[in-house]
Image (spheres, grey):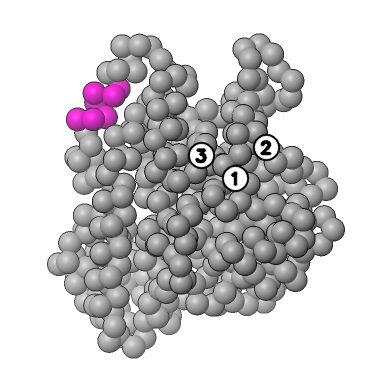
């Protein structure tokens, strides 16, 4: 029985239930189930929130990344450099766009893509560097921008875990040609099903994604290219619109909770606390510590009713799905060491100090 969950979606629903029900009634009254007013309104609101000019709602985060890559003309023969320590969808989006993923290691402190590792893999076929804004903080974008500029390639950001994250005043999608984000229910801004979006400063890329998500059509029944059916659902847009006005407050509550964990864990010698890269406003999608004998610790925490998790236990290069890339264990030692030690503690906007004290108490016991 889990009594402190990793994320608490039930509690969050109570805060917005009335707005969601009212919005569902609006959609049903208009029978505007595909695209329409709610989707457009959400796109405008989320673009403003994200400090990026254009937002295009799509069916999920994996599609968002694929369509962002396709919209910048990535395809067969192109290489996309991305970190191996991400959710598998980052790499799946690359292959679905027809390109080849080139995996690289992360830095040992923040577990963000390592610019030096990127530099070492730049080559004549590199079209895109795709950093992942992991756990709620942005990758070292200035260094990556400089590398991309020198190499003549582009940046497409995986912002699935970073809604509201800011780096030196710029949001995800503001550094690169485009960013893809996910509104999977457990994300900082989560829908009630699958949903995602592309963010971009470029009106040209925005138009291209708008067509690609809609069968490759900007004008009804006119299809100059092959597209997809990957539209943000109108009912999901209602949920996202109901939540968005609360997101800044929820992210601030996550930040406060992360600060409380930092204080509670300060004297727990076996635990390495997460670090924030200078210049980042972290939105704490996950609070990820490192501990020895992690699997046993997770088991003990779960047995004590604490919904601790691991994001992610196996780096992409060691997944069967990407065996064809030919990487062996030891290929990316920093990410592999992290994968053995990382542990995500329960973190959600409504988590109480008492709950966090219980989590840390149970963690001390689990560490023996
Ligand atoms: C880093 C990262 N990239 C991509 C995705 C894919 O998003 P979705 O599940 O909405 O397809 C996710 C989340 O699931 C993610 O965490």
Q: CA distance from mark 3 to mark 1?
A: 11 Å
Q: Residue at x 19, y 40 (%)?
A: 14
Going from N to C along the chain, the mark reached first, 2 or 1, is 2
Q: As displayed, is residue 269 above or below residue 77?
A: below
Query: Which residue carries the number 3 mark?
Result: 53
Mark 2 closeness class: few <14, some 14–19, many ≥20 residues within 10 Å = many
For the residues labelled 2 and 1, say whether their Cβ atoms are less than 8 Å apart.
Answer: yes
Residue 2 on image: x %, y %: 25, 58
Graded by Cα atoms within 10 Å as few (under 14), some (14 to 19) or many (20 or more), the crowding at tag 3 reads: some
- Quick check: is the Cβ at mark 3 less than 8 Å away from ligand 1? no
Q: Outermost residue toward the front?
A: 169
Task: Determine which residue is flagged by label 2.
Answer: 71
| Numbered disc 2: secondary structure | helix
Look at the numbered disc 3 and give the secondary structure of its residue.
loop
The answer to whether marks 3 and 1 mark residues whose Cβ atoms lie closer than 8 Å is: no
Q: Quadrant of the N terminus?
A: bottom left
Residue 153: give its label.
none
Counting the numbered discs, the total is 3
Which is closer to the viewer, label 2 or label 3? 3
Q: Quadrant of residue 33?
A: top left
Identified at 15% across, 67% down, the residue is: 354
Among the two numbered marks 2 and 3 on one chain, the one whose residue lies closer to the N terminus: 3
* Residue underneath mark 1: 178
Q: Is residue 210 left or right of residue 260?
A: right
Relative to residue 222, is residue 27 drawn left or right? left
Q: Does mark 2's beta carbon lie closer than 8 Å to ligand 1? A: no
- CB at disc 1 and ligand 1 closer than 8 Å: no
- Residue 189, percent from left and from top: 37, 45
């Amino acid at each position: 029985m889990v009594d402190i969950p990793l994320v608490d979606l039930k509690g969050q629903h109570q805060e917005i239930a009335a707005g969601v029900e009212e919005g569902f009634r609006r959609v049903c009254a208009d029978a505007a189930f595909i695209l329409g007013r709610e989707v457009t309104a959400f796109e405008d609101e989320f673009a403003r929130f994200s400090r990026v000019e254009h937002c295009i709602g799509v069916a999920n985060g994996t599609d968002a990344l694929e369509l962002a890559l396709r919209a910048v003309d990535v395809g067969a023969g192109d290489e996309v450099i991305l970190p191996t320590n991400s959710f598998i969808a980052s790499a799946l989006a690359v292959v679905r766009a027809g390109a080849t993923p080139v995996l690289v290691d992360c830095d040992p402190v923040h577990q963000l893509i390592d610019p030096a590792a990127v530099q070492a893999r730049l080559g004549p076929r590199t079209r895109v560097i795709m950093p992942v804004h992991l756990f709620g903080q942005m990758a070292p974008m200035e260094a990556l921008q400089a590398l991309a500029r020198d190499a003549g390639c582009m940046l497409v950001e995986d912002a699935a875990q970073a809604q509201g994250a800011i780096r030196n005043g710029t949001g995800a999608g503001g550094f690169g040609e485009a960013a893809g984000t996910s509104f999977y229910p457990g994300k900082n801004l989560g829908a009630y099903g699958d949903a995602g979006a592309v963010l971009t400063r470029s009106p040209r890329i925005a138009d291209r994604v708008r067509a690609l998500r809609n069968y490759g059509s900007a004008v009804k029944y006119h299809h100059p290219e092959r597209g997809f059916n990957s539209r943000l659902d109108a009912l999901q847009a209602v949920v996202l619109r109901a939540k968005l006005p609360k997101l800044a407050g929820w992210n601030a509550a996550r930040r406060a909770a992360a600060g409380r964990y930092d204080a509670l864990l300060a004297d727990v010698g076996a635990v390495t606390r997460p670090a924030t890269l200078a210049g980042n406003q972290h939105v704490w999608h996950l609070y990820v510590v490192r501990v020895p004998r992690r699997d046993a610790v997770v088991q003990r925490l779960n047995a004590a009713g604490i919904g601790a998790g691991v994001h992610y236990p196996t780096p992409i290069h060691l997944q069967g799905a990407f065996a064809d890339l030919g990487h062996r264990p030891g290929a990316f030692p920093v990410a592999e060491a992290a994968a053995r030690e990382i542990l995500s503690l329960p973190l959600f906007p409504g988590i109480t100090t008492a709950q966090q004290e219980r989590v840390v108490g149970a963690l001390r016991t689990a560490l023996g």
